[in-house]
Amino acid sequence: GASGGGGVAVASLWTEVNRCGQNGDYTRALKALSKILHENRDDVTALHCKIVCLVQNGSFKEALNVMNTHTKVLGSEVVFEKAYCEYRLNRVESALKTIENAPDQTDKLKELYGQVLYRLERYDECKTIYTDLIRNSQDEYEEERKTNLAAVVAAMSQWEKAPMEDLGLSESTYELCYNTACALIGQGQLTEAFNTLRQAEGQHVYHYSPSRTFTFPFIFKSSV
C-alpha cells in the first residue's frame, strides 16, 4: 500500500492529467499517467486515459499494444477504442470482428460500424445503420450522419443502380448536395444532377470525406 504521501502525489498527478486533457496536451498527460501507472500498473482508469491520449496523438499501434497487454484488466471497457485503432490502421476486417463481438452496441460503436461497412462496400447494411442512427440520435453530429448516409446511397446507386429513395435529407450542406448529385448521376438523371451540383457550388465548399474523426470524451477522475 502507498503511504499517505503517495496518495497525495497520485491525486496531484490526476489533477495534472485532467488539466492537460482539457488543454489538449496529451503528451504531457501521458507523462503524468506513466507515473500513476508506475504506482499501480492495473489502474483501469489510468490505462483507459492512456489509451485515449495515445489515440488523440495518432499513436494507434501503441494504443493497441496497451490494450492487448492489459486485456484481462480492461475487459470490454475499451472495445470502441480498439475497433477505432484497427480501423485507422486499415485493419478493417479486425475492426469489424471487434465491433460485432462487442457486448454492448453503443451509438459510437454503431457509427464506427457504419464506417467499417462503408469501407468494405457493404452499402445495404451501412445504410440501415445510418438510417437507424439518424432516427434515434439527438446530438450535434446529425448533419454529418446525413452526409454519410447520402454518400452511402450515392455509392449504392453507382454500383447497384439502387433506387434513390427520398431519405428525408434536407440538402443543407455542400457534401450532401454533392453526394445526392453523385447518386443521380449513377442513375443517369443528369439534369437533376446538374441542378444539384449548381446548388452545391452555392454552398460553402470543402472536401468531402466519408469518414469523420471521432471525438473522444476525456475521462475525468475526481481526485479523492
Image: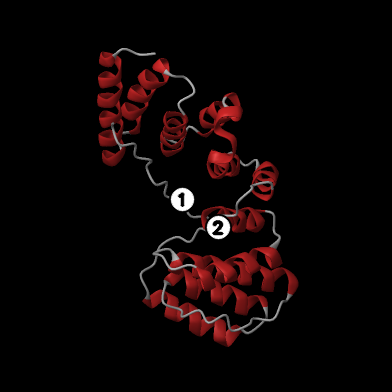
Image quarter where the N terminus lies is top left
Residue at label 2?
111
In the image, residue 189 lies at what x, y percent?
63, 84
Whether 122 is drawn above or below 96: the answer is below
Place of residue 194 in the rendered image (x, y in percent of width and height, measured from the top left): 52, 82
Tell me which residue sits at (38%, 40%) in the image.
219
Amino acid type at circle 2 is Glu
Among the two numbered marks 1 and 2 on one chain, the one whose residue lies closer to the N terminus: 2
Callout count: 2
Query: SS of the residue at dot 1?
Result: loop
Residue pointed to by mark 1: 214
Decide if residue 93 is on the left or right side of residue 9: right
- In the image, 164 versus 102, the foreground residue is 102
Image quarter in which the C terminus is found: top left
> Which amino acid lies under the numbered mark 1 shown in the image of this protein?
Phe
Tell me the CA gap for discs 1 and 2: 9 Å
- Mark 2, residues whose alpha carbon is within 10 Å: few (<14), some, or many (≥20)? many
In the orientation shown, which residue stands out farthest toward the bottom?
191
| Residue 42 pos. (x, y %) | 49, 23
- SS at circle 2: helix
Residue drawn at x 51%, y 31% as measured from the top left = 63
What colouring method underlies this structural image?
A: secondary structure
**Above or below 64: residue 131:** below
Up-down: is 184 above or below 83?
below
The answer to whether 131 appears left or right of 178 in the picture is right
- Residue at 70% x, 67% y: name it: 124
Residue at image coords 46%, 37%: 55
Q: Are marks 1 and 2 in contact (CB under 8 Å)?
A: yes
| Quadrant of res 139 | bottom left
| Lateral position of residue 28 relative to residue 69, left or right | left
Q: Residue 205 shows which numbered tag?
A: none
Q: Position of residue 152 (x, y in %)?
A: 61, 67
